Image (cartoon, grey):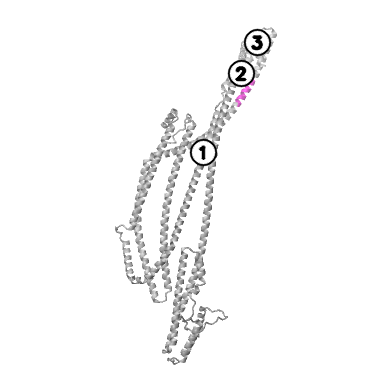
Amino acid sequence: MPRRLTKDELDEQFEQFLKDSVSDDSVDLGGSAKSSSVRDSLGRASQKPPPKKTSAAPVRWWQEEEDSEETPGRGKQSQGCVELPTAEELMRPIRPDSMDNTRGFTLQPNEKLYLQMKALQAQSKLNEEAMFTENQRLLNELALTNNSPRTLGNVGCVAHIQRITQLLGKMQAAQRTEERLVKEIHRLKQEKQALEVDLQMMSKERGLAKAQVVYTSGDKSFELQWYAVNQELLDRDSARLRAATADTHKRTEQVEKLKMELGKRVNQSKTKERAGDAKRIQDLERQVKEMEKILRHRNPNSLPALIYAAANTSAEDGGAKSSPPTQTRALLERCIRRLEAELESRDNEAKRSLRAMEQQYQRIKLQYEQEISDLEQRLTQKHQLQTGSSGVWQAQVCSLQQELELLKENHQSRERTLQAEVHSLQEQLTQQAQSPPPQCSPSRHQRQAETALGVRIERLNQELSAKTRSVQELSRTVERLQKERKTMLCGPGPRSEGRTVGETATFPPTQDEKDYQPTAFSVSHISEVLQESEGLRLRLEQLELQRDKERVVLQAAAAQAELRRVQQHSAEQVSSLRADQQRELERLLTGHALAHSSSKVAELTNQVTTQEIMVQHLRDQVKELQGTKDALAVSKLREDTLQNQLTRLLEEQKQAKECHSPELRHFTSLERKIHSMELRHTQREKELQQVIGQTRLVVEAEQQSEVKRRRRLAQGKTRELEVFRLELDSILDILRELQRQGVVIPAPDRASPLRTNSHLQ
């Protein structure tokens, strides 16, 4: 293989050749000494070793080309044998960086760019080989022209110069294309770096988001666990508190009993003392009356007799006005304290039940969040599997590309027929779009849609049967609980039966018309009422749990449907992305072929390939339109069937509601009754508070009036005692005066005033 010449050697040989060809007016065709000297010089130049490197800065080949173009002496000289830097040499400093950068890249767009870069490298290698062969061919032609006799003279030299200029133009075009490729490679590297930066930012953001989600989920789970533990502790404390309150109630009842016994004893002792005092007062009054009678008989118009008559009338009026003190205050206070304690206990129980329900809701919510996170992880794993399978798909694409390259020649002959077929298909498509769709036989999509519709109908029928069974079970449980409630109400005895019969007989049609009866629960014990309320509360909790379970089942079904819809949507997106990638790859191939074509035949082949790609694209569009048309018809049919099925299911649901309406109405009426009872309870509490305030005011007023009355009575008694003392003094003065006068008084009459006087003293 001959050694390639450098640019300097080629310049020297070309200048020598021009001098030899121009200086001779008549060329010696038989082979002159000059031609032999030229051949010898060419041979020596070809055998000469490459020149040593000088100390001057190396001049690039494109700079030398510019200098050669700017030099007026040289003009358009022959440079067919110039040593050009190959694409391999240009790509050598770029390749390690590109390999290092693309080694860690796994995303599909970067893989596409990497494959494009590989294709460009292969194309540059092919261009290098073609240029090398062209250079060798030119060298051989030059050697042949130098060795052959010069028969054409100056005309042949001019043609040869034109040939060389053409080759120089082609070489410059190749250099320009190579520069453009270098710029494209640089741009692709920049885009790759930008994509790497974006990928790193997105990965960092995803890591931060995952860390935030994990942190928040951990905090929530910890808080919920703490709430659950706190709820357990609160339940224990509430149980202890209930036991303590029960014990305190027992002790308070015992204390009240002891107080009542002590009060009874005190009242008995007071009654005994009052009886003794009453006897003494009666004796004194009898003695006073006897003395007054004696005085009235002796001197009826005296001043003491008149004062005594006035005192008797005032005493009778005061006795008539005095009223015994009321004893309802203690009873009302005890009732108020008992009602306040019951109200506090009810409030505490309601708070505890509400807190327990909230904790249960939070626990169920946490379970659902965990299930959703598991489903999301599964979905990401499926996406990763799909992206992993994209590598196999890429290999298949490469094999298909090779097959496409092999079949290009066969497709050239079929171009006209395909164009005619495309025109006919377009006409048919327009006719089908204008004319109504005929009744055609069911296609594969329709059969699939029918089978899917049948499966969905069966599944909906199964769900409907399950719902009907659950409704029947609920109705049976409601009936059973109603029977149990009736038995519980009828169980305590004949008194409760009579009371329940009376209640059912006088039960109002609405809650607003029911009057409050204070003796409604007076016969029954409070434990029976508590048991009944506890049973109703348990039943209500069971119904709420069952409703929550049904809601959970419905939510799970909705989540499954949403997951299926998301999977279908992702599959459609993947298929569309694959189609877009295929079209983009074909476009890049055609563009690359057009950019690197160097002859008319290559341009024509590229045009043919582009036409084939357009035809294939039009075929794909026609197929997609046909598929969308079939899918639209199937979706319309499916929508109609689903609408009919929905109306039928709504009618069945309405019929089921009508069939089970009494139980539901009874349940709703029970809820309304409970609500109305709570409202009445609150209203009654308000009324009791008002009554308590009024009773307190009345009791205070009565106490003040009683104190004033007793004060007036005490003042009146003191005045009467003073008057009585004055009368006694006057009577004693009269008796002493009678004794001085010598009047003899009988013994019994003398003893009674002395006894009265002793008692008074």
Q: Which residue is mark 1?
A: 349
Q: Which residue is mark 2?
A: 277
Q: Nearer the viewer, mark 2 or mark 3?
A: 2
- Which residue occupies the extreme right position in the image? 740
Which comes before the other along the chain, label 2 or label 1?
2
Q: Could you tell me residue 71's position as x and y percent?
A: 51, 83
- Which residue occupies the extreme front position in the image? 1
Q: Could you tell me residue 347's position as x and y percent?
A: 52, 38
Q: Could you tell me residue 107's position as x and y percent?
A: 47, 63
Whole-angstrom CA distance, mark 2 to mark 3, is 23 Å
- Three-letter residue code for mark 3: Ala
Q: Nearer the viewer, mark 2 or mark 1?
A: 1
Q: Secondary structure at mark 1?
A: helix
Segment colored magenta? 707-720
Asked whether the residues under the numbered discs 2 and 1 touch, taking CB atoms below 8 Å apart as contact, a structural biologist would say no
The residue depicted at 57 percent of the width and 80 percent of the height is 56
Q: Is residue 384 magenta?
A: no
Q: In front: 550, or 27?
A: 27
Q: In front: 462, or 617?
A: 462
Q: Secondary structure at mark 3?
A: helix
- Three-letter residue code for mark 1: Glu
Q: Which residue is mark 3?
A: 751
The residue depicted at 42 percent of the width and 38 percent of the height is 669
Whole-angstrom CA distance, mark 3 to mark 1, is 78 Å
Whole-angstrom CA distance, mark 2 to mark 1, is 56 Å
63 left or right of 652?
Answer: right
Q: Does 695 sit above or below residue 606?
A: above
- Three-letter residue code for mark 2: Asp
The residue depicted at 69 percent of the width and 7 percent of the height is 742
Crowdedness of circle 3 by 10 Å Cα count: few (<14), some, many (20+)?
Answer: few
Q: Is residue 710 visible?
A: yes
